[in-house]
Image (cartoon, helix red, strand yellow):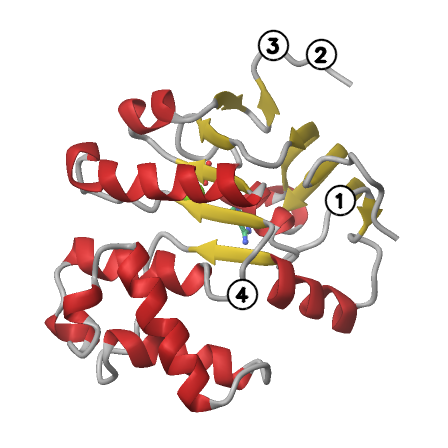
């Protein structure tokens, strides 16, 4: 059961080590995180400090060695794999560093296919929803362009629209702007921020872009698997 008033996402004392034998690294060292609805969060930190590792855990794509992950007050890290897959599909949107669009399919089809595959929508309804989402990210006029006929920035927008297709409580983005400058993606970010506020969702963005980080409601600095200023557990 979800708790009323609980944050969208909470973690308690997350630990994760990766690699094997002597090469095993203690990547995440006791992370406590609390993401409220209606807010945008940035995580910044040097390469290798564990940002992507954390996002994989928050996206329920990997499991912590210790600690807890709660979605709306409900513990999810210890749920069976099938249940975690369902939760991820229904409540979490993920924008990866590389956008993984199907080059041979149109922008709209890249959104529509996963919606149909998840089983919720018939193809016609999914196509309508795909076009609506492409409108939100400013790509209404490019819906029928194939993935390989879109610019890097346009592919990024399609990836964001795709991540929104399940109306997620939590949108996770791992360096979504890549090498694009903030100026080009500011409008998109403002639209996401407005969406978060209007629909009480949380958005967490890993970024190297200081302007984007500053535009978020909260900026968390990460170093060696901990948030700066956090007490060593
Ligand atoms: N599958 C893996 N096996 C071993 N080490 C890994 C693996 N994935 C990441 N690492 C290591 O974990 C640390 C954190 O990686 P990552 O979370 O990708 O950092 P960031 O996203 O902040 O750049 C790095 O030292 C990286 O080399
Ligand atoms: Mg990374």
The relative height of residue 221 versus residue 12 in the rendered view (above or below) is above
Q: Quadrant of residue 33?
A: top right
Quadrant observed for ligand 2 in the rendered image: top left
Of helix, strand and loop, which one carries label 4?
loop
Residue lying farthest to the right in this orientation? 1
Tell me which label, 4 or 3, sits earlier in the chain: 4
**Position of 1 compared to 72: left or right?**
right
Instruction: Please give the label number shown on residue 166.
Output: 4
Where's residue 156, x and y in %?
27, 56
- Between the residue at mark 2 and the residue at mark 3, the CA separation in whole angstroms equals 6 Å
The relative height of residue 217 versus residue 202 in the rendered view (above or below) is above
Where's residue 191, x and y in %?
34, 43
- Between the residue at mark 4 and the residue at mark 2, the CA separation in whole angstroms equals 36 Å
Q: Which residue is mark 3?
A: 229
Instruction: Please give the label number shown on residue 72.
Output: 1
Q: Residue at x 63, y 43 (%)?
A: 24
């Amino acid at each position: 059961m979800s708790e009323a008033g609980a944050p969208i996402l909470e973690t308690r004392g997350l630990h994760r080590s990766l690699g094997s034998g002597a090469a095993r690294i203690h990547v995440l060292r006791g992370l406590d995180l609390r993401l409220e609805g209606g807010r945008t969060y940035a995580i910044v930190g040097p390469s290798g400090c564990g940002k992507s590792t954390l996002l994989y855990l928050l996206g329920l794509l990997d499991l912590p060695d210790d600690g807890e992950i709660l979605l709306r007050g409900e513990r999810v890290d210890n749920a069976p794999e099938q249940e975690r897959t369902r939760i991820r599909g229904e409540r979490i949107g993920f924008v990866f560093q590389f956008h993984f669009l199907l080059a041979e399919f149109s922008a709209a089809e890249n959104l529509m296919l996963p919606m149909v595959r998840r089983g919720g929508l018939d193809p016609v309804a999914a196509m309508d929803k795909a076009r609506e989402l492409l409108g939100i990210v400013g790509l209404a006029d490019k819906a029928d362009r194939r993935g390989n006929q879109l610019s890097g920035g346009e592919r990024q927008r399609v990836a964001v629209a795709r991540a929104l297709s399940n109306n997620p409580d939590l949108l996770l983005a791992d360096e979504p702007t890549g090498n694009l400058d903030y100026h080009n993606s500011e409008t998109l970010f403002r639209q996401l921020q407005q969406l978060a506020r209007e629909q009480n969702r949380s958005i967490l963005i890993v970024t190297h872009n200081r302007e984007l980080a500053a535009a978020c409601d909260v900026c968390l600095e990460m170093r060696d698997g901990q948030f700066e200023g956090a007490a060593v557990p």
